[in-house]
Image (spheres, helix red, strand yellow):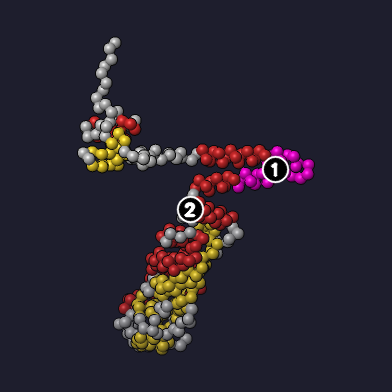
């Protein structure tokens, strides 16, 4: 077997990790690590010496961990067996994700569970190549974006239900209009998923929710739309009027279903009369259940009076009685109110007696 003089690996665009396949490497060989690559010497399943981008001459001095394991003798022609793994650290975009089955999402505003589908894309880069190599690669000869995507697709789907629910609650959205909140949902999903990716040495650089769709023919979605329509109607016409209207609709449908043909015409008419009385009773009950409205207070007549030759007022009856008790006016005081042709004594108006003191006590 030929002794290797140059160790390098050219990753394909969709390849995250590749392994250099030759086993016989000699001291003095050249190790070439391309930009956005990190190379690792691996022996017996242990990740040893690490090299970032650049060109290196392999010597026992720059592979101390490997040298310690295999006890390399001196001499440039001494061959040794080791694996060299190359990790691609370029940013890989356009990784697709999507829900294999509908997510059962409870609408936070209306409490209705609705099946929802979602799809989008994400981008990533390996930020900690040593951790990534330990977490994923194992003994595989290579590791591509499809393999990684299959794993993270499952992670995304397992967390997406809670992410969508939390996002709807945070942005005050319903399943009906969550599609218009895709930007906010994308940002929140990326923040929540980032720690999960980092645990494997991966940095989530982009996460986009392209669309969230609901089957509009689904029964639960129809119930949700009915709830939203009902809420809007209640807001417009008021809760009491809405309840009365719904009751009328029910009775109207019942009346429409009572007649079944020529033989049942009489029955239908009789039932219709019964329904009519029910509607009247319902309307009466609705009216009677309304809170009573108190009539406005009876307006008090306003009087002007002449005190010490000057006009004062207007005064209502209670004010006149107070003035009488205080001695300011008496039954002979001239008074006038709207509708009177001229001034007249208060006693003549039947308001205050002309006699300011009680009459004498009669003899028994």
Residue 251 in the magenta stretch? The answer is: yes
Task: Identify the residue at horizontal 63%, vertical 38% (top origin).
Answer: 277
Task: Identify the residue at horizontal 51%, vertical 65% (top origin).
Answer: 212
Crowd class of label 2 (few under 14; some 14 to 19; many from 20; radius 10 Å):
few
Q: Which mark is residue 258?
A: 1
Indicate the secondary structure of the residue bearing disc 2: helix
Residue 264 vs residue 169: left or right? right
Q: Does residue 82 show up?
A: no
State the CA–CA distance, disc 1 to disc 2. Answer: 33 Å
Residue 332, position as x, y percentages in the image: 27, 32
Please say if 274 is above or below 67: above
Task: Identify the residue at horizontal 41%, vertical 75% (top origin).
Answer: 125
Residue 49, position as x, y percentages in the image: 35, 77
Q: Which mark is residue 235?
A: 2
Residue 2, position as x, y percentages in the image: 46, 88
Crowd class of label 1 (few under 14; some 14 to 19; many from 20; radius 10 Å):
some
Q: Are marks 1 and 2 in contact (CB under 8 Å)?
A: no
Q: Earlier in the sequence, mark 1 or mark 2?
A: 2
In magenta, the rendered stretch is 249-272
Please say if 253 is above or below 330: below
Quarter where residue 172 is shown: bottom left
> Mostly what secondary structure, the magenta segment?
helix
The residue closer to the viewer here, 76 or 304, is 304
Q: Does residue 287 show up?
A: yes
Quarter where residue 71 is shown: bottom left
Residue 218, position as x, y percentages in the image: 59, 57
Task: Identify the residue at horizontal 41%, vertical 88% (top origin).
Answer: 6
């Amino acid at each position: 077997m030929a002794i290797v003089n140059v160790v390098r690996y050219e990753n394909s665009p969709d390849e995250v990790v590749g392994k250099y396949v030759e086993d016989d490497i000699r001291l003095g060989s050249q190790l070439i690590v391309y930009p956005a690559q990190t190379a690792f010497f691996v022996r017996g399943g242990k990740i040893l010496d690490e090299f970032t981008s650049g060109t290196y001459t392999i010597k026992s001095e720059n592979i101390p961990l490997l040298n310690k394991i295999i006890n390399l003798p001196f001499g440039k022609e001494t061959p040794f067996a080791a694996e060299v793994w190359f990790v691609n650290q370029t940013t890989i975009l356009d990784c697709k994700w999507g829900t294999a089955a509908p997510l059962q999402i409870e609408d936070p505003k209306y409490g209705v569970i609705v099946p929802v589908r979602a799809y989008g894309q994400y981008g990533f880069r390996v930020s900690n190549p040593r951790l990534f190599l330990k977490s994923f690669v194992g003994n595989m000869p290579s590791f591509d974006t499809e393999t990684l995507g299959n794993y993270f697709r499952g992670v995304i789907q397992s967390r997406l239900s809670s992410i969508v629910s939390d996002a709807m609650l945070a942005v005050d959205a319903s399943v009906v209009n969550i599609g218009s909140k895709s930007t906010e949902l994308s940002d929140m999903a990326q923040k929540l998923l980032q720690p999960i990716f980092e645990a494997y040495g991966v940095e989530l650089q982009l996460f986009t929710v392209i669309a969230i769709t609901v089957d509009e023919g689904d029964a639960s979605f129809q119930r949700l739309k009915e709830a939203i329509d009902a809420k809007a109607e209640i807001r417009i016409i008021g809760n009491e009027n809405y309840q009365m209207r719904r009751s009328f609709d029910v009775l109207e449908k019942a009346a429409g279903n009572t007649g079944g043909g020529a033989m049942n015409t009489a029955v239908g008419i009789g039932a219709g009369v019964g329904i009519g009385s029910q509607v009247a009773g319902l309307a009466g009950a609705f009216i009677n259940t309304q809170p009573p409205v108190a009539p406005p207070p009876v307006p008090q007549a306003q009087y002007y009076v002449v005190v010490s030759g000057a006009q004062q007022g207007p005064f209502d009856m209670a004010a006149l009685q107070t003035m009488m008790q205080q001695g300011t006016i008496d039954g002979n005081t001239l008074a006038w109110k709207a509708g009177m042709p001229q001034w007249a004594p208060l006693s003549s108006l039947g308001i205050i007696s002309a006699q300011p003191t009680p009459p004498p006590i009669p003899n028994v």
